Image: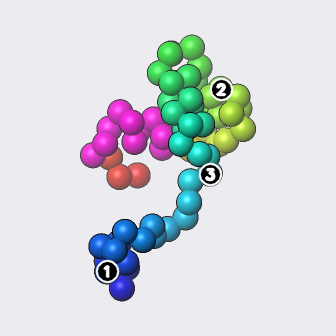
Amino acid sequence: GQREAMARGVHCGRSLSVDQATAAAIVETYMTGLYTLKGVGQKFGVSESVVKRLVYKKTKPEYRG
């Protein structure tokens, strides 16, 4: 059933904790090299793992974590 739903374009799973604009800003901020994962998370009010996941999605598209 889940494969059929995905084939129809239905989003399966939990939604993102941040919107697309914020996600892009998080990745940009981290990529400057001035902040750690933890520092970016504190700045945007999200966990370190959210920052890591967003950065990995941008820099390593083949990564599924």
Label 3 SS? loop
Q: CA distance from mark 2 to mark 1?
A: 40 Å
Asked if 52 appears above or below 1 in the picture, the reply is: above
Residue in the image at 36% along x and 85% along y: 1
Comes first in the chain, label 3 or label 2:
3
The residue mark sitting in front, 3 or 2, is 3
Q: Is residue 62 left or right of residue 12?
A: left
**Residue at numbered disc 2:** 39
Give percent across and percent down for residue 15.
Answer: 56, 60
Give percent across and percent down for residue 7.
Answer: 30, 73
Label 2 SS? helix
Q: Residues within 10 Å of mark 1 (few under 14, many from 20)?
A: few
13 in the magenta segment: no
View extreme (bottom): residue: 1
Q: Which mark is residue 4?
A: 1
View extreme (front): residue: 8
Give percent across and percent down for residue 6.
Answer: 35, 72
Give the amino acid at mark 2: Gly
Residue bounds of the magenta highlight = 51-62
Give the amino acid at mark 1: Glu
Comes first in the chain, label 3 or label 1:
1
Residue in the image at 31% along x and 80% along y: 4
Residue in the image at 70% along x and 28% along y: 43
The residue mark sitting in front, 2 or 1, is 1
Q: Nearer the viewer, residue 20 or 27?
A: 20
Q: CA distance from mark 3 to mark 2?
A: 18 Å
**Residue at numbered disc 3:** 17
Q: CA distance from mark 3 to mark 1?
A: 25 Å
Q: Residues within 10 Å of mark 2 (few under 14, many from 20)?
A: some
Q: Quadrant of residue 23?
A: top right
